[in-house]
Image (tube, rainbow, N blue to C red):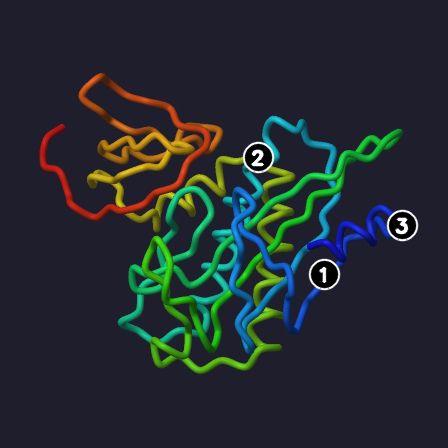
Amino acid sequence: MDEARALVEKGMLDESVVVAARQTQGRGRRGRKWDSLPGNLFMTYIYRHDCPLSIAPQLSFVACVSVGEALRSFIPPGNTITYKWPNDVLLNGKKVAGILLETIELSGQEENAYLIACGLNITDFPKDVRYPATSLQEESILLAYEEILNSIVISLQKHLMAWSEQGFSSIYTLWMRDAAYIDASVTIDLQGKIQSGIFKGLDKDGAMLLKTSDGLMTINAGEVLAGGTHAFSN
């Protein structure tokens, strides 16, 4: 991601993909360290668009459904791909990929540059993490590195075009179709404050709708720590 940013700042503004065989300063959301284990995929897609900054976070959902679609084209029956709000892809209920989005505001340009990064656990996964993780290999799914990389890029290009032309509605439908924990109890970390409730899906912009004892909350930033206990009340 740092290399992609450097390329943009040097004037390389066309859409491109930057891939690292390994990372020495891998990071996730909120500046957390991302364990860059050998054999896994670390990529950043450079995307230019003139969308308002307020809707740019939707690109994380575009990336999630793109990675999910790419994985589904390879994994055998009996395995499930779901999406954990706001930016994780789960394989059989465990995190297999994470998305990180950063913005570069381009002075004097009509468009901004967006860095859409994906870390995918192909051969290994971190064990000491807040949320259960896995890898393709751990789930007995063997894929060639180049094969899954090419599939993700093609899928990403397709869904970015759909998002650009049609807006968030098509991405919303795909994400909600395979959302983890819909109508189930979840625990959310709101930057240090813990909140529990029933996950009711997304609003039209991608914010989480959480039903609590105080009513329906709209959450724009947070992290799902746990979930899966279904509630039977409306």
- Mark 2–mark 3 Cα distance, whole angstroms, equals 30 Å
> In the rendering, at what x and y percent does residue 46 appear?
72, 51
In the picture, which quadrant includes the C terminus?
top left
Vertical position of residue 39 compared to residue 127: above or below:
below
- Mark 1–mark 3 Cα distance, whole angstroms, equals 16 Å
Horizontal relation, residue 159 to residue 194: left or right: right
Residue of label 1: 17
In the picture, which quadrant includes the N terminus?
bottom right
Q: Amino acid at mark 3?
A: Lys
Horizontal relation, residue 197 to residue 74: left or right: left
Give the label, 2 or 3, closer to the camera: 3
- Mark 2–mark 1 Cα distance, whole angstroms, equals 23 Å
Vertical position of residue 89 compared to residue 102: above or below:
below
Residue of label 3: 10
- Residue at 42% in and 74% down: 136
Are there few (<14), some (14-19), or many (20+) residues within 10 Å of tag 3?
few
Horizontal relation, residue 201 to residue 107: left or right: left
Horizontal relation, residue 179 to residue 61: left or right: left
Residue of label 2: 167
> In the rendering, at what x and y percent does residue 64 appear?
49, 52
Give the label, 1 or 3, closer to the camera: 3
- Residue at 20% in and 39% down: 185
Q: Amino acid at mark 2?
A: Gly
Q: Earlier in the sequence, mark 2 or mark 1?
A: 1
> In the rendering, at what x and y percent does residue 174 appear?
42, 47
Are there few (<14), some (14-19), or many (20+) residues within 10 Å of tag 1?
some
